[in-house]
Amino acid sequence: MRIAFSGTGNSGKSTLVKSVLYTWKTYTTPKKTYRDLIKEEELTHSSNTTLDTQDKILNFMIDQVQGSTLSDQIVYDRCPLDNIAYSLWCHDKGYEGFTKSFLTKQIKLMRESMRSLDIIFLCRFDSSQQVVDDGVRDTDINFIKEIDNIFYSLFRSHTQDPEGDIFFPKGDSPLFLELPNNPQSRIDLLAEYIAPDNSIIL
């Protein structure tokens, strides 16, 4: 099964990846992540992102998920949907170049890559938790909350009208589920969906 954790910065995605790898021993995660790409190419990102950064990160994430197969047992820290959330934020803020045509092109590419995922778990920001600076993520609380709201809007849009959702392919979409904020509750919920043979329990 191919699983992705999506959500704003400081929402516990990396911690969850580690928890899955510890709890379900047959799972793996890619050795290289978008964070490595950002560091290697010294890309400006998050609230300072650019068209070039968004294109490079999207292509990197798409290549990763589309390189998997149905039999893989893999977990991702973010997926192409995450990239779109940040591009949407830039469009809302009027960033130069983040036009409707740019977004349309990115969404089209991202949507097709969703066929290569089985389930996406949405991690929400918990304002009671301390924001941790990992040297890559943006630590501005307002920015984190604004991105969190975009992710939740994407989630609500999909759950309320999955057939009309432009962000997911019709008839071949991953499950999209919201996780609680409590760490143990998150693991408990994951256990309800990941069977002993690593298939999805519906």
Image: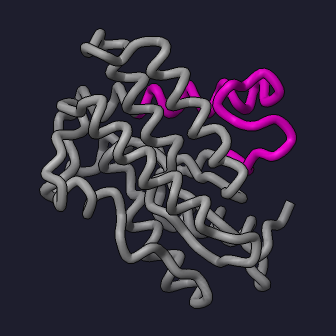
**Magenta stretch encompasses residue 70:** no
Q: Is residue 134 left or right of residue 71?
A: left
- Residue depicted at 57% across the width and 68% down the height: 187
Write the residue at 37% across / 13% down.
92
Residue 46, image x, y percentages: 25, 37
Q: State how the image is colored.
A: one colour
Residue 132 appears anywhere in the view: no
Of the pair 150 and 90, the residue shown nearer to us: 90
Is the residue 77 above or below the residue 110 in the image?
A: below
Residue 160's x, y, as percent? Answer: 76, 25
Q: Can you give x and y, in whole percent of width and height, for residue 86 in the image?
A: 37, 32
Quadrant of the image containing the N terminus? bottom right
Q: Residue at x 32, y 21 (%)?
A: 90
Residue 55 image point, x, y percent: 37, 38
Q: Which residues are magenta?
A: 148-176
In the picture, measured across the screen, residue 23 lies left or right of residue 189, that is left
Image quarter hosting the C terminus: bottom right
